[in-house]
């Protein structure tokens, strides 16, 4: 009995192909839980797409994909000398965002492949405009010198999401890249719209822009994906009957429906959001009030409605409260469940 992801294979593969065809230089991103599919499956799909580079989040993830994909593996987390699980080798491309880190890589004998990251308005990782120039000078000088050094394969630009147009910032960043004299004409970009990419390719025709895409590639056609949870048990309760770990009592007559899927799967866990709008803040406040009195809407659908958690999710199962009047499922039935794919671990994935 499991939390399952059913995938319409033909529809999903058609979507992947359409994204590939409309994004020249595509670098698929496979990180974390593999967007709900798992990293091994995404590595195989990257090989099927025929792309020459796959991006992962961390060095630990390199080992999960390299046996299933034979192209280059770009690590998005910047290389650090204190990282204990760094994977080196001809296929690995390291992201570098500090001069001291670049110097440490240059000192190696194996001439690592690197992408130089330019700091953006995200303020997460990367070189300033001045530092990018110093990094370029250092890389070029060492390559011409003692035979050691690094192979600079591109500049990385990781932009914020949902902040309006990125074109003004990208124009400034591109000017910095040109002024730095970086020995490459390849720019890896994240979170640009198709229209923004098209504009940049016209304006900077002598550069190659390579979009790194994760969510809109793997999860871009949600209609091809159907998460479902198995019903494990159904118990009738009368008003006042006690149930659950915490000894709660039923507010009215109904049923406790026990379903697969709990905190170990990511059910009931929610990533923080910005809550930028008044409506978003009002919803968060309302959900907080519901949580305080024990009435929280679950992602599980019974009788066409998202039912309330009877109590907080358990590790591998959840208890739902369904009042009288709704058609109850039977043990063994499957329920639709709304999940956040990037935080959900499915027991099995079935691709048609």
Image (tube, helix red, strand yellow):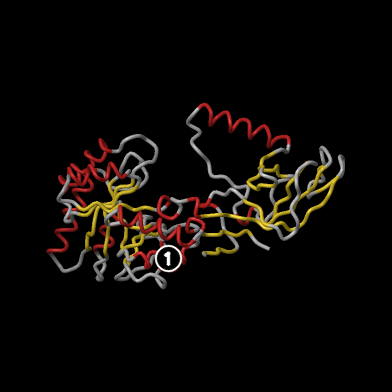
Tell me the residue at 32%/44% (across/down). Answer: 192
> Is residue 99 in sight in this rendering?
no
Q: Is 199 situated left or right of 72 in this image?
A: left
Tell me the quarter of the image containing the N terminus: bottom right
Using the rendered view, name the quadrant where residue 200 is placed. top left
Q: Quadrant of residue 227?
A: bottom right
Q: Residue at x 29, y 47 (%)?
A: 157
Q: Is residue 308 left or right of residue 23?
A: right
Outermost residue, top side: 278
Where residue 352 appears, as percent x and y from the top left, is: 52, 65
Q: List x then y, in percent, for residue 71.
A: 32, 68
Q: Is residue 94 visible?
A: yes
Q: Nearer the viewer, residue 100 or 232?
A: 232
Q: Is residue 23 found left or right of 252 in the rendered image?
A: left
Residue situated in front as seen by the camera: 121 or 248:
248
Q: Is residue 133 above or below residue 169?
A: below
Q: Nearer the viewer, residue 178 or 6?
A: 6
**What residue is drawn where x is 25% and y is 58%?**
103
Which x, y percent locates residue 62? 41, 65
- State the residue position of label 1: 85
Furthest-left residue in this view: 144
Q: Callout 1: helix, strand or loop?
A: loop
- Residue drawn at (15%, 58%) of the image: 140
Residue farthest to the bottom, as pictured: 67
Q: How many marks?
A: 1
Quick one: label 1, few (<14), some, or many (20+) residues within 10 Å?
Answer: few
In the depicted structure, whether residue 143 falls above or below residue 302: below
């Amino acid at each position: 009995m499991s939390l399952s992801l059913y995938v319409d294979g033909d529809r999903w593969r058609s979507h992947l192909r359409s994204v590939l065809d409309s994004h020249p230089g595509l670098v698929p991103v496979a990180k974390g839980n593999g967007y709900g599919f798992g990293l091994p499956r995404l590595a195989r799909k990257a090989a099927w797409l025929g792309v020459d580079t796959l991006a992962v989040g961390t060095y630990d993830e390199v080992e999960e994909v390299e046996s299933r994909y034979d192209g280059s593996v770009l690590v998005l987390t910047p290389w650090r000398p204190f990282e204990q699980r760094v994977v080196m080798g001809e296929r690995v491309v390291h992201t570098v965002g500090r001069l001291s880190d670049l110097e440490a890589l240059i000192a190696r004998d194996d001439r690592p492949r690197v992408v130089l990251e330019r700091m953006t308005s995200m303020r997460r990782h990367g070189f300033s405009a001045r530092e990018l120039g110093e990094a370029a000078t250092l890389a070029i000088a060492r390559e011409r010198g003692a035979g050691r050094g690094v192979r600079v394969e591109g500049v990385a630009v990781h932009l914020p999401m949902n902040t309006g147009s990125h074109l003004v910032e990208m124009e400034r960043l591109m000017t910095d890249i040109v002024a730095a004299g970086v020995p490459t004409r390849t720019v890896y970009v994240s979170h640009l719209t198709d229209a923004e990419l098209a504009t940049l390719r016209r304006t900077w025709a002598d550069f190659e822009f390579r979009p790194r895409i994760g969510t809109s590639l793997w999860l871009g056609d949600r209609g091809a994906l159907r998460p479902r949870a198995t019903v494990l048990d159904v118990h009738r309760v009368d008003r006042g009957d006690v149930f659950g770990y915490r000894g709660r009592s039923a507010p009215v007559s109904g049923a406790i429906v026990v379903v697969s899927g709990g905190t170990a799967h990511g059910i009931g866990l929610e990533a923080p959001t910005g809550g930028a709008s008044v409506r978003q803040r009002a919803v968060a406040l309302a959900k907080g009030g519901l949580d305080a009195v024990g009435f929280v809407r679950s992602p599980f659908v019974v009788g066409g409605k998202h039912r309330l958690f009877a109590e907080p999710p358990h590790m591998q199962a959840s208890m739902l409260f369904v009042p009288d009047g709704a058609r109850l499922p039977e043990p063994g039935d499957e329920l639709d469940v709304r999940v956040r794919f990037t935080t959900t671990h499915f027991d099995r994935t079935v691709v048609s």
